[in-house]
Amino acid sequence: MTEVSGLALPAYYLYYQSPVKIVETPDGGARVWRVSIDTGGWQEKNDLFSEIVFDVGGEVFRRMPEEFVQEVERFRAHHLEGEGPIFALYETVQAVRDLAKAENRHLTPMEQAIIRGIRRRTFVMFEEQLQAAGDPGADPEIARAK
């Protein structure tokens, strides 16, 4: 973890319901990455730095790494469509959530744990695919850090 102008990096946020991370650059600066609603990949959005860092509150919420991973996967599953193992797992999560809703109940602790585990797994899978495709913002290690 590094500090840039008093900000410990990396830092994770939910910005107007969109996951954003701020990471250190090799020269000691900061880079802002926002999840793309179209691809699920990372878009560099450095112009958001001040608004996020100095306006926390309202529609900007700080997240711990585990919460961030969950937010990213919730966002991707909601906005993206596709085929393959990642999307099959997104459908599994939705099926668990739909069952609880149909039964008019909250998710059980076991169901919550299953969903968290699946999302951690899909995050790593998605990020590894992004890395292989050359996305400079991809970082599967966020989900592996404890």
Image (spheres, rainbow, N blue to C red):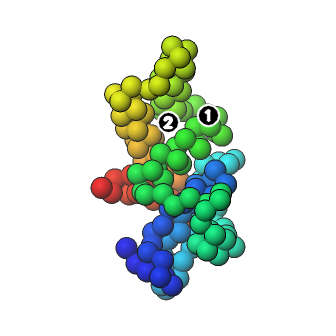
Q: Residue 135: x percent and y percent?
A: 56, 60
Can you give x and y, in whole percent of width and height, for residue 34 in the image? 61, 60
Residue shown at the point (49%, 20%) measured from the top left: 105
Q: Amino acid at mark 2?
A: Ile
User: Is residue 13 found left or right of 18 in the rendered image?
Assistant: left
Q: Is residue 53 left or right of residue 124?
A: right
How dense is the environment of label 2, judged by Cα within 10 Å: few (below 14), some, or many (20 and up)?
A: some
Q: Which quadrant would the C terminus be assigned to in this image?
A: bottom left
Badge 1: residue crowd in 10 Å (few <14, some 14–19, many ≥20): few
When the figure is inspected, residue 13 is found, relative to residue 95, above or below; the finding is: below
Question: Judging from the image, what secondary structure is the residue with disc 1 in?
Answer: loop
Disc 2 + disc 1, Cβ < 8 Å: yes
Q: Secondary structure at mark 2?
A: helix
Q: Which residue is mark 1?
A: 82
Residue 63 seen in this snapshot: yes
Report x, y in % for residue 24.
48, 76
Residue plotted at (47% across, 82% down):
6
97 vs 59: above or below: above
| Lateral position of residue 115 relative to residue 61, left or right | left
Residue furthest front as drawn: 58
Q: Which residue is mark 2?
A: 86
Q: Is residue 131 visible?
A: no
